[in-house]
Amino acid sequence: MSDAGLLRTELCGLSLRTPLVLLSGCVGFGQEYTRVAGFSHRDVGMVVLKGTTLEPRLGNAPHRLAETPGGMLNAIGLQNPGARAVVRDILPRLDFSETLFAANVSGATVEEYAEVTRIFDDSPVAAIELNISCPNVKAGGVQFGNDPQMSARVVEVCRKMTRKPLITKLSPNQTDIAENARRCIEAGTDAFAAINTLQGMAIDLPYRKPVLGNRQGGLSGPAIKPIALLKVRQVYEVAARHGVPIIGQGGVACADDALEFLLAGASAVGVGTALFYDPLICPSINQGIADYLRGHDHHNVSALVGALNW
C-alpha cells in the first residue's frame, strides 16, 4: 500500500490526507510557510488558521516570544484583522485544493464566540476550532476553558451557529479535563484538540523583569509533551465512548512523538512549535508513521488510535 493510503485518516467526517494538523498560531493565516522552498500543504491533513476575534486586535506589547529549555513561551495576544476581514480578504487567497483549513474562533464573551462562528459558517473553511482558553470579561477574567460549565456554554451557543464540525481546544490549566470534555460532548462538540499551551513565564535577570511584555505566556514545545500525552489519554477515555475524535498536540517534533499521541488516543496529531526551527518537518514525520505502520502490518492510521496497553 502507498504512503498516501496508509496515512489517510478521518476526523469527524472530514477526510485528511495525512494525520498531521498544523496548529493555530504557528502558521499565521495559512500562507506564511508557502514561501519556504520545499514546503507543501499537501503534506498535512489540515491547517488551523490564526486565532480570530470579532473585531481587529493589535495584540500584546513586546516581547511576545521567549525561547525556554525544551520549548517556547508566546504571548501574541490574538493579533488579527477581525473575522469579517479574514473571510473577505484572506480566505479567497488560500488554495483549498491542497489541504483542509479550519478557522480558530476566540472571544471575550459567549456572544462574541457565537458571532464569529456564524461569520465563519458562511465561508469555505472545513471546520471551526473553538479556542476556549480566553478570559471571560463578564466573569472577572476567568478563562472559559478552565470552567466546565463555561466551556460547555461556548460550545452550546456555537453549535447553534454552524453545521460545520466543531473542534474544542481544551486547556490543560484546569482541575478535571475529562469532566470538561464530557460537558462539551453533551453541548455538541464534534472533536477535541488536546492540549492548548500551559501558562509560564521567563525572567530577564539583568533587569529583574519578566521577559514577555504580558508577563506570562503559553508554554509549548517538547517540554510539555508528557503532560499532553496524559491529558489526551484522560480525554480519550471519555471521548471514545461517544465516538468523538481527538487531535493530540503538545511537543511533537518527530515521528515517534506522533506515534505516541496516536497510541494514547489521538486520531490526528498537531504540529506547531517544531515548525519554527524546521518548517519542512512534516514529510519526515509522515514517513516515520508510514514505516511504523508497515513494520507492524497495519493498513491505516486508525489501527493505532488508542491502542496503548493501558
Image: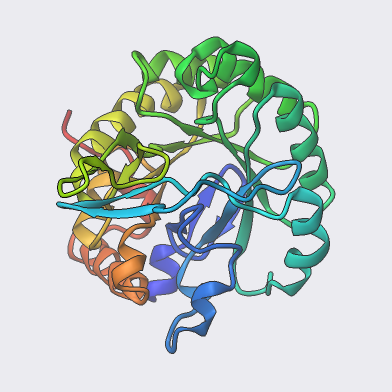
In the rendered image, which quarter contains the C terminus? top left
Residue 108: % across, % down:
65, 28
**Residue drawn at 33 percent across, 48 percent down:** 303
Residue 89: % across, % down:
79, 66
Q: Is residue 123 visible?
A: yes
Left or right: where 274 falls relative to 156: left
Residue 67: % across, % down:
25, 56
Q: In the rendered view, would you say 71 is above or below 165? A: below
Q: In the rendered view, would you say 230 is above or below 252? A: above
Left or right: where 309 falls relative to 259: left
Q: In the rendered view, would you say 60 is above or below 138? A: below
Residue 280: % across, % down:
35, 77
In the rendered image, which quarter contains the N terminus? bottom left
In the depicted view, which residue is nearer to us: 190 or 84? 84
In the rendered image, which quarter is residue 106 located in? Answer: top right
How is the structure coloured here?
rainbow
In the rendered image, which quarter is residue 165 located in? Answer: top right
Left or right: where 77 falls relative to 273: right
Q: Is residue 1 visible?
A: no
Q: What is the residue that sits farthest to the front in this orientation? A: 207
Q: What is the residue that sits farthest to the bottom in this orientation? A: 37
